[in-house]
Image (cartoon, rainbow, N blue to C red):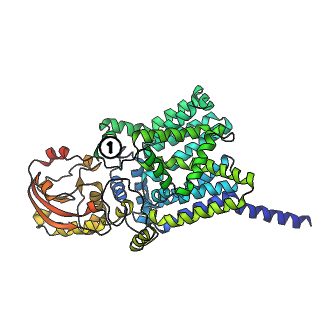
């Protein structure tokens, strides 16, 4: 009889493990990974992905518009998995599952039970901004993991008093700076949060200072590169701000966009999370994280940051907000509210998902947006076609390379041998570099972003095929200009529709012209 009881007890424990909060979060993490993995090849290469592929062939300690980590990750993916869409998007797909798992872990560490863990994880899954960020190979895929990994360590420091964990915060902060300089915002937010709470006592011990030195040591190679090259990233940021390329938002519009990017139904969750950190007795020990978010938000409002720059901070708010909702439901015995809220999140997540991840064929997607009457808000001022920019920038690149190849191979052999292909932006140059070998094209040249540092290769400027420029602009630097082809794709961005120009001879030597054409924008 005792053996039977033990067997039944063991079976019940096993069943409870499979239905625990950790298990549910794991199921959700696998589900979001599979979603991204299955649809990774639905459209095409994104403009930034083509640039990262080019950067992976020019590994360095820095680039005009990014630290080196994304180029290294791209190089690794290409080396071990190839450069198909599935291969280069494998890392962000895995990272999406890790973020869901990390959010559930933070929730559990803060005291969240099964419902809270599942709710916080689901909020991450249905947030439109994360669906976008983890479908594409970008720096933004790693950024939330590094921010939230640091947040988890801060929680453990508060709970255990183990100040040596600041060393690991320093490691993550240094890696974050090598991924994206915006890690400075999170670090500054944590410092502000520490100063505004009793956790400021950390500054009286050596560990947090040593953690800062570790972060600096990891970041130092990129910092030296910036110094050696005259801080090109700062010049780029100033140029972008002056150009008016970003959609200008006032404070209220910025906050409203946060609600849209994170999914409107999650708004009560992350607001409750902010309240939980800053006002509740339960969240009082972790108030540093509430002030961290508030400080980063203030920086974004003051500096006019893009709306998605704040996105990496929300998982810690979802975690706290889910705990607040859990407590509210338990006090009132409103089990139906929990089920109803999760159901509503799931349904709206399914409805909005096609806007952010290409689960639908493109024509079906266009009809779908017409039916529901909604498109994601733009983040730049470019004129749009039938697709929003993040989708449109996945179309037309190989067709552009094919059109360029037709113009290139139509040139006389002696002219073709000395003809360079000049792209006006890194997407055009990256597309030629990536698709060009298939069509017998040489590597492109450009003066946009880091292509400027890679220079004109061995070309003299005697003969150029120019992409993305007007005939009038080309005539300012070329002795003779002729239209030799056309690039057009129904779904691509309108600014990627242009005539291919053949420039015969530059008015000034290419070495003299190159600095004047520098385009950091």
| Towards the viewer: 475 or 384 | 384
The residue at the point 23 percent across, 61 percent down is 442
State the residue at coordinates (28%, 62%): 494
Depth check: 465 or 304 in front?
304
Count how many numbered circles sit on residues in the image. 1
Q: Quadrant of residue 204?
A: top right
Name the residue at 49% across, 32% down: 213
For image coordinates 57% across by 31% down, the residue present is 196
Indicate left or right for 315 with 306 as reference. Answer: right
Q: Is residue 422 above or below residue 395?
A: above
Toward the right, the furthest residue is 1
Q: Which image quadrant: the N terminus?
A: bottom right
Q: Is residue 280 above or below residue 329?
A: above
Mark 1 Cα shell of 10 Å, populated few (<14), some (14-19), many (≥20) = some
Secondary structure found at label 1: helix
Q: Nearer the viewer, residue 415 or 34?
A: 34
Q: Position of residue 193 (x, y in %)?
A: 56, 35
Q: Could you tell me if residue 490 is visible in this image?
A: yes
Residue 130, horizontal then vertical, whole percent: 49, 56
Find disc 1 in the rendering and name its residue.
241
Q: Is residue 152 visible?
A: no
Above or below, 228 against 343 in this view is above
Whether residue 292 sits left or right of residue 405 in the image: it is: right
Which quarter of the picture shows residue 14? bottom right
Left or right of 509? Residue 101 is right
User: In the image, residue 140 lies at what x, y percent?
Assistant: 45, 51
Question: Where residue 169 sits in the image (x, y, percent)?
Answer: 55, 39
């Amino acid at each position: 009889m005792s053996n039977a009881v033990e067997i039944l007890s063991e079976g019940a424990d096993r069943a409870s493990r499979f239905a625990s909060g950790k298990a549910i979060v794991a199921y959700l993490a696998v589900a979001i990974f599979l979603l991204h993995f299955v649809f990774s090849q639905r459209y095409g290469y994104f403009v930034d992905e083509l640039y990262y592929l080019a950067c992976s062939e020019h590994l360095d300690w820095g680039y005009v518009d990014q630290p080196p980590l994304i180029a290294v990750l791209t190089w690794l993916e290409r080396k071990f998995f190839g450069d198909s869409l599935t291969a280069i998007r494998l890392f962000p797909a895995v990272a999406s599952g890790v973020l869901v798992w990390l959010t559930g872990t933070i929730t559990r560490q803060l005291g969240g039970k099964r419902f809270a863990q599942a709710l916080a994880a689901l909020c991450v899954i249905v947030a439109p901004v994360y669906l976008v960020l983890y479908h594409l190979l970008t720096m933004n895929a790693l950024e939330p993991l590094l921010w939230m990994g640091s947040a988890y360590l801060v929680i453990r420091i508060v709970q255990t008093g183990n100040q040596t964990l600041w060393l690991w915060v320093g490691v993550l902060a240094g890696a974050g700076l090598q991924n994206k300089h915006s890690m400075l915002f999170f670090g500054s937010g944590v410092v502000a949060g520490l100063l505004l709470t009793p956790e400021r006592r950390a500054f009286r011990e050596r560990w947090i200072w040593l953690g800062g030195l570790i972060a600096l040591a990891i970041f130092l190679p990129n910092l030296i590169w910036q110094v050696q090259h005259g801080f090109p990233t700062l010049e780029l940021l100033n140029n972008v701000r002056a150009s008016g390329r970003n959609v200008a938002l006032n404070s209220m519009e910025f906050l409203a966009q946060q609600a849209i990017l994170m999914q409107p139904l999650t708004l009560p969750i992350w607001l409750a999370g902010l309240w939980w950190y800053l006002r509740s007795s339960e969240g009082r020990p972790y108030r540093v994280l509430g002030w961290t978010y508030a400080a980063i938000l203030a920086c974004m409002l003051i500096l006019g940051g893009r709306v998605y720059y704040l996105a990496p901070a929300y998982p810690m708010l979802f975690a706290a907000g889910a705990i607040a909702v859990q407590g509210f439901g338990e006090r009132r015995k409103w089990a139906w509210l929990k089920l109803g809220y999760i159901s509503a999140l799931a349904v709206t997540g399914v409805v909005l998902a096609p806007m952010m991840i290409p689960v639908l064929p493109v024509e079906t997607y266009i009809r779908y947006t017409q039916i529901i009457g909604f498109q994601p808000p733009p983040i730049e001022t470019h004129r749009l076609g039938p697709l929003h920019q993040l989708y449109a920038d996945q179309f037309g690149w190989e067709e552009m390379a094919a059109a360029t190849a037709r113009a290139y191979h139509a040139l006389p052999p002696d002219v073709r041998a000395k003809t360079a292909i000049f792209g006006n932006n890194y997407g055009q140059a990256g597309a030629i570099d990536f698709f060009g070998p298939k069509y017998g094209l040489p590597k492109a040249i450009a003066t946009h972003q880091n292509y400027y540092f890679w220079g004109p290769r061995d070309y003299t400027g005697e003969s150029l095929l120019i992409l993305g420029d007007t005939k009038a602009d080309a005539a300012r630097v070329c002795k003779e200009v002729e239209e030799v082809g056309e690039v057009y794709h129904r779904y691509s961005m309108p600014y990627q529709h242009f005539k291919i120009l053949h420039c015969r001879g530059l008015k000034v030597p290419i070495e003299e012209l190159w600095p004047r054409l520098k385009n950091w924008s």
